[in-house]
Image (spheres, grey):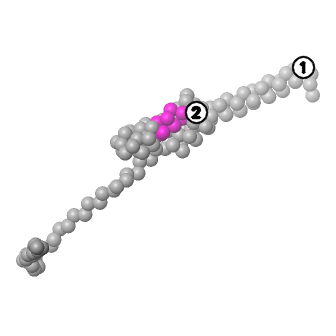
Amino acid sequence: MEMVKENKVDILGPPQSSAPVATTVVTIQTETAVPDHIVWSLFNTIFMNWCCLGFVAFAYSVKSRDRKMVGDMTGARTYASTAKCLNVWALVLGLLLTITFIIFFVAGSLMISQTISEVIKQYGGP
């Protein structure tokens, strides 16, 4: 014997008040994008590795990517933030030290050429 259940639905009709209906839309992202800065870290490791900051930033970037793969977004953001900070410092120090090196190289070259020309004049050169 088969039992049939009936559900009764009351039709209420339109709302009785003329007030506007407020709606709220909640958007839930299933995957949050956490940048791990691994390409920037690799660039700093290869080209601007002053004081090994690029290598340390690369290590933190890899840790951030590992945390993201496990699903720990808070840990991934923390490691990514540290990697970004180290990358900024590596880039700034690398640029400053490179510019300083170029200035000293140019100044040294000018001083050497000036000294050589004075020596040549002093010892009877043309």
Disc on res. 74: none
> With respect to residue 26, does 107 lie above or below?
above
Most prominent secondary structure in the magenta stretch?
Answer: helix
Residue named by callout 1 = 123
Question: 115 or 51: which is nearer to us?
Answer: 51
Q: Residue at x 75, y 30 (%)?
A: 110
Q: Is residue 60 magenta?
A: yes
Q: In which quarter of the image is the C terminus?
A: top right
Question: Amino acid type of disc 1?
Answer: Tyr
Question: Amino acid type of disc 2?
Answer: Asn
Q: Quadrant of the N terminus?
A: bottom left
Is 117 left or right of 18, judged from the image as shown?
right
Residue 89 appearing in the image? no
> With respect to residue 98, does 116 lie above or below?
above
N-terminal of the pair, mark 2 or mark 1, is 2
Q: How far is the residue under mark 2 from the one under mark 1? A: 46 Å
Q: Is residue 1 magenta?
A: no
> x, y percentage for residue 119?
85, 21
> x, y percentage for residue 19?
11, 73
Mark 2, Cα crowd under 10 Å, few <14 / some 14-19 / many 20+, is many
Residue named by callout 2 = 49
Is 91 left or right of 13, judged from the image as shown?
right
Residue 2 in which image quadrant: bottom left
Is 21 left or right of 113, judged from the image as shown?
left
Q: Find numbered disc 2 in the image and state the secondary structure of the residue it sits on.
A: loop
> x, y percentage for residue 93?
55, 33
Of marks 2 and 1, the one in the foreground: 2
Q: Find numbered disc 1 in the image and state the secondary structure of the residue it sits on.
A: loop
> x, y percentage for residue 68?
41, 44
> With respect to residue 66, does 6 lie above or below?
below
Magenta stretch? Answer: 54-62
